[in-house]
Amino acid sequence: MDEQTVEQVRSVIASIPPGRVLSYGDVAELAGLRSARLVGRILAEDGADVPWHRVLRADGNTAEHLRRRQLDLLRAEGVAPRGDRVDMRRYRWGAESGRAPESR
DNA sequence: GGACTGACTCGGT
DNA sequence: AACCGAGCCAGTC
């Protein structure tokens, strides 16, 4: 794994404000990567000390094995998941008034 | 090298 | 909503 890439990804995630979220793909883009999977992989290995819970799937779902913990952590900072799903249009970093720069 | 596996995503059925 | 196939990239066997 390229150290520089890892640091890029970690710094992007570290800069996400509390109460906001990004998708793996968003992080990949901000870090200059083409692969969202790489972001997940990096978090799996070196994500323990960054706010990894602010990163979720593009559709607002979380990875199965993390679901419970991640949603708890998010609730703790003001994000209210609807069932297993987070409202990306509302909480996505950069989407202040329900309008995302690129809300799909 | 090939096949398989993931904290992924998108477009098409 | 659910399932598929294709891209994606690094690691393991």
Image (cartoon, coloured by chain):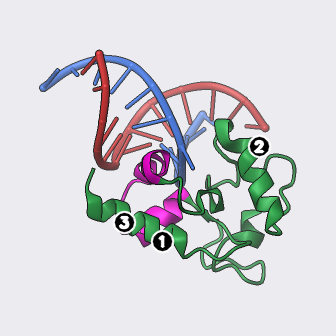
Chain colours: A green, B blue, C red
Of marks 3 and 2, which one's residue comes earlier in the chain?
3
- Residue A59 location (% of width, % of height): 67, 53
Cα separation between marks 2 and 1: 24 Å
Labels 2 and 1 touching (C-beta < 8 A): no
Chain letter belonging to callout 1: A
Chain letter belonging to callout 2: A
- Element on which disc 1 rests: helix
Which residues are drawn in magenta? A24-46
Which residue in the protein does label 1 denote? A12
Residue A33 is at least partly visible in this image? no
Of marks 3 and 1, which one's residue comes earlier in the chain?
3
Which residue in the protein does label 3 denote? A7
Of marks 2 and 1, which one's residue comes earlier in the chain?
1
Q: Residue at x 83, y 60 (%)?
A: A75
Nearer to us in this view, C4 or A67: A67
Considering the whole magenta stretch, tell me its main secondary structure: helix
- Element on which disc 3 rests: helix
Q: Residue at x 59, y 74 (%)?
A: A16
Residue furthest front in the image: A49
What is the crowding at mark 3: few (fewer than 14 residues within 10 Å), some, or many (at least 20)? some
Q: Is residue A27 above or below residue A83?
A: below
> Do marks 3 and 1 both belong to one polypeptide chain?
yes
